[in-house]
Amino acid sequence: MSGFSESWLTLREPYDRRARNTAVLDAVAAWASERSSVAVVDLACGLGSTLRAVSERLPKRQSWRLVDNDLSLLARAAGLAKPPDLTVTAVPVDLARDLEAALDGPVELITTSALLDLVSHDWLDRLVTESAARRLPVYAALSYDGLATIDPVDDLDSVVIDAVNQHQRSDKGFGPALGPEAAATAPSRFEAIGYTVTQGSSDWVFGPKDAEIQTEVLTGWAVAAREIGGPSITDIINWLARRRGHVASGRSSMRVGHVDFFARPTGTR
Ligand SMILES: C[S@@+](CC[C@H](N)C(=O)[O-])C[C@H]1O[C@@H](n2cnc3c(N)ncnc32)[C@H](O)[C@@H]1O
């Protein structure tokens, strides 16, 4: 997992797409069903995977404001426009600093994916407060929930996964990150201010044939575990070699837990 590189986002997108919770997407579609058009802001858009996953569930006329702080990703995502029905504005914003500015203007729906586990409690509070002040619904997909299983089991798996979960809580530019806590905390924060929340699991499921993504994820976990300094470097290297061996011989599978939710202000459809 190399940060937010184009290659990593491209590799994960089909797995994200398959994982997205259908009941949550249905709730977004039901909210949108009586509208003739919709204005969306997608926070931390990356290459635009949320637009690709959600736009078919929305009215034909859509305007998307895609927001990210990576200019190269934004430039690629801007190419998703299909005028006149689907317009796209790509806006460079540091969301840690300027979330409020990103939400200003004509917006009817906030979307995001694979972001909330990177942000802090304080930033999540800002998102909840700003969404509620504007009475905006929020679709947030693919927050990692800390539950990962690998088959066949290795004695060091749980030690590495614990280290990864600790690493997930380190600062990713928004202050101390929620990490795995985001999956439960974010929907409950919206419920606490009176939103109606539909949520469901969106786990990554990798089978023996999904070798490339398994190798990327396992390597990323080894790097994270080394940075946290839990297991010894020798133990991590040997663990990664054993795991890669299972992947290469086509007998490795993995499940990595995620959660999606759609939160809408009570009284809106
Ligand atoms: C895990 S990627 C998810 C991208 C996309 N939503 C997806 O699901 O493929 C996280 C995204 O957050 C963006 N990001 C990280 N920190 C940011 C910040 N401070 N302001 C704006 N975007 C940020 C990254 O550039 C990256 O595109």
Image (cartoon, rainbow, N blue to C red):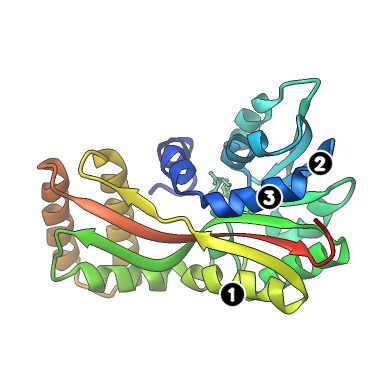
User: Which residue is rendered at x = 42% and y = 42% of the image?
Assistant: 12
Mark 2 vs mark 1: which is more N-terminal?
2
Secondary structure at numbered mark 2? strand
Determine whether, in the image, residue 170 is placed left or right of residue 121. Answer: left
- Give percent across and percent down for residue 25: 60, 49
Amino acid type at circle 3 is Val
- Give percent across and percent down for residue 235: 15, 67
Q: Is residue 227 visible?
A: no
Outermost residue to the right = 105
In the picture of the structure, the residue carrying the numbered disc 3 is 28
Tell me if mark 1 has few (under 14), some (14-19) or many (20+) residues whose alpha carbon lies within 10 angstroms of its own.
Answer: some
Q: Is residue 63 visible?
A: yes
User: From what the image shows, is residue 221 above or below residue 170?
Assistant: above
Q: Are marks 3 and 2 in contact (CB under 8 Å)?
A: no
Q: Quadrant of residue 237?
A: bottom left
In the picture of the structure, the residue carrying the numbered disc 2 is 39
In the picture of the structure, the residue carrying the numbered disc 1 is 185
Kindly report which numbered mark, 1 or 3, lies closer to the viewer in this rendering.
Answer: 3
Looking at the rendered structure, which numbered label has been put on residue 93? none
Secondary structure at numbered mark 1? helix
